[in-house]
Amino acid sequence: MDYGISIWANNNFFIDNKKVKLNYKSKPSLVKIVKEIRDGGIRGPILLRFPHLIEKQISLIYENFKSAKDEFDYKGSFNAVYPLKVNQYPNFVKNIVRIGEKYNYGLEAGSKAELLLAMVYNGKNSPITVNGFKDEEMISLGFIAKEMGHNITLTIEGLSELTNIIKINKKRYGQTPNIGLRIRLHSSGIGIWAKSGGINSKFGLTSTELIEAIEMLKKENMMSAFTMIHFHIGSQISEIGPLKKALREAGNIYAQLKKLGASSLNSINLGGGLAIEYSQHKDEIKRNYTLREYANDVTYLLKDISTTKNVKEPNIYIESGRYIAASHAVLVAPVLELFSQEYTQAKLKLKDVNPPLVQELYELYNTINSTYAQEYLHDSIDHMNSLLTLFDLGYIDLIDRSNTEILVNLIIKKAITLLKDKGSKELLQIQDMIQERYLINFSIFQSLPDFWGISQNFPVMPLDRLDEKPTRSASIWDITCDSDGEISYDKNKPLFLHDLDVTKEDYFLGFFLVGAYQEVLGMKHNLFTHPSEATIEINDDGYEIKNIIEAQSIIDIMEDLDYDTKEVVKTLDDKIKNSNLIDNSAKKDILDEINMFLNDNSYLLS
Ligand SMILES: *Cc1c(COP(=O)(O)O)cnc(C)c1O
């Protein structure tokens, strides 16, 4: 059982000596890293960041486009920017900027806050692109970025933004940012994220508006600022077809705009959308192209259109975010409990004389073997149904019922072990019936919001014991008090985990490819906040754990919600001091205790 690691892991992780390891330099196991962090006192879920995986993705993008440009003798330049909305956390962004410096990898901003981050962190020689709806303040920020010396392009989403740029340009100090026009294409991506492209999309100028924009720029003598057209057909583009269609459309618009006198126009920005393979199962694979194919298609198509239309080959910009960010982060969370742990032989309370069917279950349990496993299993389920009816009619008592549940559970578990090498369809069905619910110390709302919101699956697997065949069909429960906080067992993409005794061993699950979108989309449902995080730099001899940030303390969470924390602390103190249920001597200890709890994070202590 390799949990589809060959499908989704992109050779970043591999299984060796029972454990999931990083396939880089000293190849440490994830369990070892996590245990070391936990030994430092951090509990609950931990998000691990791996800068070498950011570096890998960035260099792959530049290398593939370089090969494509060489292959087709493409004259325009290749440029990329990282869209901040995908992950704005400082320990990610600072690494992006540091690693991207040698490529002049830039940043893309979609809001005032993101633009300010870009103005702080973007490298001197790297481009900044700005998308999204802009008011006069945001446009002024764009001008300030230009005045500071940044190479910035403001992409306008509608004509009113252009009107504002023209107005602000008159008031400022002579430096105009580059202007990009977002074009509204007929083509759009497919899949759950495709809404950002297409003729009905939220963004972009129609052909009529494009012509009008050109006229406005000409009239204001600002044509020299218009350098870029932009489109973005959606995130997680699983098939290359729609992108090629969009490129042809955009390439022709580019050539037309050049003919209309856009003499400074020299760039096409393709937006983001490069897909990540999240699937753990062969028949669920979604992405039908590679980065190489993407780079080749983009370069070839733009070359072809430019040659046909006799225009200079445009500089290429891409804004892929998911592709860069997803793989760098792994969430590791401990299992707190298995809900059917109570079904052990030790819990049986057999009487001297049991109802005949219970007695028979007991014998099935003791004599089941591989030849008769399936038959005994059917019998036991039959008996259970009869016994439950007898209970409803008042013929057997609660102890008999408990014995029934335990015995049937034990028989099913034994049968699964006996049948496991036969791989029958039947076995899958049985496993569906006795799902084990694993309670995990994390919040799905906080750490996998796209699972909650749009049923996006993320690869999940245990980090250890990978030499043993897991036999429990697992559903995963988080610790929120919300029934949506569950990844239920799905027999089309089954998850099997190991049987375990949580009182005796740690068992960690890794959730992979969570570095894009999940962190900032995460919700504080039940006041579970961003998990503790650490950055892991792997070297030839081992690794270094850097920038450990513990999940927010409860008192800080309250402060974030604008509670008056002085009032909170004082009220708790007063209630303890004024209580007449305890001795005065105990009060100081209780005060210390509650103070400690207020300064802990809100995850459970495991
Ligand atoms: C969201 C967005 C991106 C990033 O998309 P990914 O699918 O993460 O690559 C790029 N450009 C624009 C304009 C966006 O809105």
Image (cartoon, helix red, strand yellow):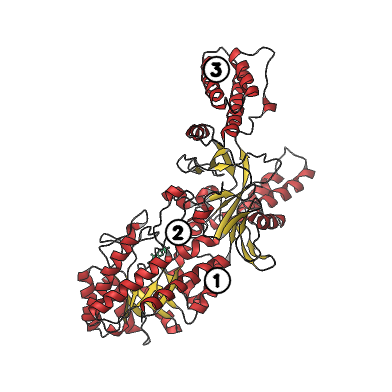
Cα–Cα gap, marks 3 and 1: 63 Å
Q: Percent from the top left, x then y, of residue 359?
A: 63, 16
Q: Nearer the viewer, mark 2 or mark 1?
A: 2
Using the image, determine if residue 546 lies above or below residue 564. Answer: below
- Report whether 60 appears left or right of 559: left
The residue positioned 65% from the left and 57% from the top of the image is 29
Q: Percent from the top left, x then y, of residue 482?
A: 50, 42
What mark, if any, has residue 276 been given in the picture?
A: 2
Q: Mark 3 highlights which residue?
A: 387
What mark, if any, has residue 413 been given in the picture?
A: none
The residue positioned 48% from the left and 60% from the top of the image is 516
Q: Percent from the top left, x then y, of residue 497?
A: 58, 42
Q: Percent from the top left, x then y, of residue 274?
A: 41, 63
Which quadrant of the figure has residue 477?
top right
Tell me which label, 3 or 1, sits earlier in the chain: 1
Q: Quadrant of ligand 1?
A: bottom left
Cα–Cα gap, marks 2 and 1: 23 Å
Instruction: Work out whether residue 474 can be spotted.
Output: yes
